[in-house]
Amino acid sequence: MLRELVLNEFKGLNRLTSRLNMPNGYAWDIHNGYVKKDSKTNLGKIKQRSGIKKLNSVDFTNACKYIYEAKWSAGSTDVIIKEGTRWAKWDGVDSFDDLDTGRTDGTRGQAVMFANQIIMADGGKLRKCTSGYIVSDLSTDEAQPTKVSKIHVHNHKVWCNDDDNPMQARYLKTDSANAADSFSASSDAGTLDFSKILPSGDTLIGFATFAEVFIVFIFKRYAIVYQAGTDPTEFAIRQIIPLNCVSGHAVKQIGNDLAICSLEGINSFRSSIANQDLDTDDLSKYIAPLYRELLSDLSDTTNVSLGFSHSLNHLYVCVPNTNPTILVYSLDVGNFVGRWTGYKCHSICERVDGTMLVGGDGYVYVMNSGTNDDGEIINFSYDFPALYADIFGANKAFKQIEALITHDGNPILTVNYAYDNTASKTPLTIPLTSEGVQWDSDDAIWDSAGWAGSSAERVLNSGMLGRGKALLLSLSNNVLDATVEIEGVLLRYCKEGIKVR
């Protein structure tokens, strides 16, 4: 008699143990896909990611290290990038035109909006850009630092670092960043010197605002929380937290919390405030070994970036190593749910309209768009943990696989499988070409209202061979302009005796 193993609870990635010793529900790998939560059933679905397309058809020379969208007071927006020795502006058609040239080569850059001007930091003097695209030094104040790479706006003040004095933070005159005394105004502008606060030398690499009233100074080894308004006499230090932050671009606001990439993992700042320390078993607790492996391949961790998609509720961790990878965290699932490759990820930005942009070599790309990667195949696969079914020590002979899949195009679902004690079996290939069935038809295998109004295809294959204690199963699709979404998998097997090998 055939028994059934139902796989319809998908919890995202897990790399804490070997694939042979993982709990059901987690995945060993989700390549170019992710788990999304069904709001009706509260269960996960496996979904192949969407593609990318070029924003600019006319290429530029270097890697796009930083992307920023400026929103002017009149309501219009501009996408600007830092590339090589220039800041450039998207022309809305096919290219990025020069905005400011002759700047420090290869720096990542950072920009903010303040009083309807873009302020740009790139390792030299701060620059300002008006709504008429006139660019000049931010201020004529001789007290301003000449090498600034980080900038932030908090409670009516502009804050910046000073690369010549890495343990200092500069705060500018209230509501005034471009005046002749913006850096030197008495009792209103000044410097915070952390060399007398931290127990050893460090480097300021970024800023963040937390809970609206607090400014967080991100150092390589510490985060310092200050309560800072407009009056410097009321500035007050609140907390010092040990932190090995990898990049000033790897701090991202998520709702009322901050996500921070450290050398150990991706952390929630709110939990660190409560615990007086950064818990390495935080957002990335299930994938910490994978995360650290990706970081180890980086020559410079300051190139790591964080982005957030409000439309998908995804946090993206961009690691531009030799095999550029984006790790995807889902706030809905509460875990990392995908590992994306296939395109460069030097920088990332969410536009006002929700469009996600990612910076590559010579191009800026639109993410989560279409069914191919700029004309290339999206190679998707989902690797299940070792499946022992009902008894860990007994042999099983899996005979049949059944699934319910919605799809775009005509994908070919490839079923790769093996047993823990044998070599891989010949993969099963299942073309998906039908127009699908409705949830309440005779052909549907699950009576789930979640499929109402959707096109779905019943997959059934009885060609599985072999036997063993644990089944190693992977599902994949490698067809151009074809994507799949899998709600659940049903495996039928024969239980056999316990054999001691």
Image (cartoon, rainbow, N blue to C red):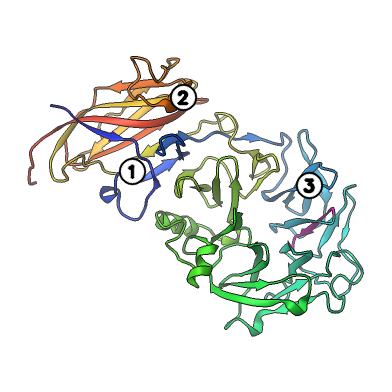
- In the rendered structure, does residue 216 fall within the stretch colored magenta? no
Cα distance between the residues tagged 3 and 1: 43 Å
Q: Where is residue 105 in the image (x, y as percent from the top left)?
A: 73, 58
Q: Which amino acid does label 2 sit on?
A: His
Q: In which quarter of the image is residue 366?
A: top right
Label 1: which secondary element: loop
Q: Dots 3 and 2: beta carbons under 8 Å?
A: no
Q: Is residue 53 left or right of residue 402?
A: right
Read off the magenta span: 116-123
Q: Dots 3 and 1: beta carbons under 8 Å?
A: no
* Mark sitting earlier along the chain (3/1): 1
Label 2: which secondary element: strand
Q: Position of residue 38 (x, y in %)?
A: 45, 36
Q: Which amino acid does label 3 sit on?
A: Lys
Q: Which residue lies at the image location 25% right of the left edge and 41% below the top edge? A: 387
Give the residue number, with chain letter if any, for mark 1: 25
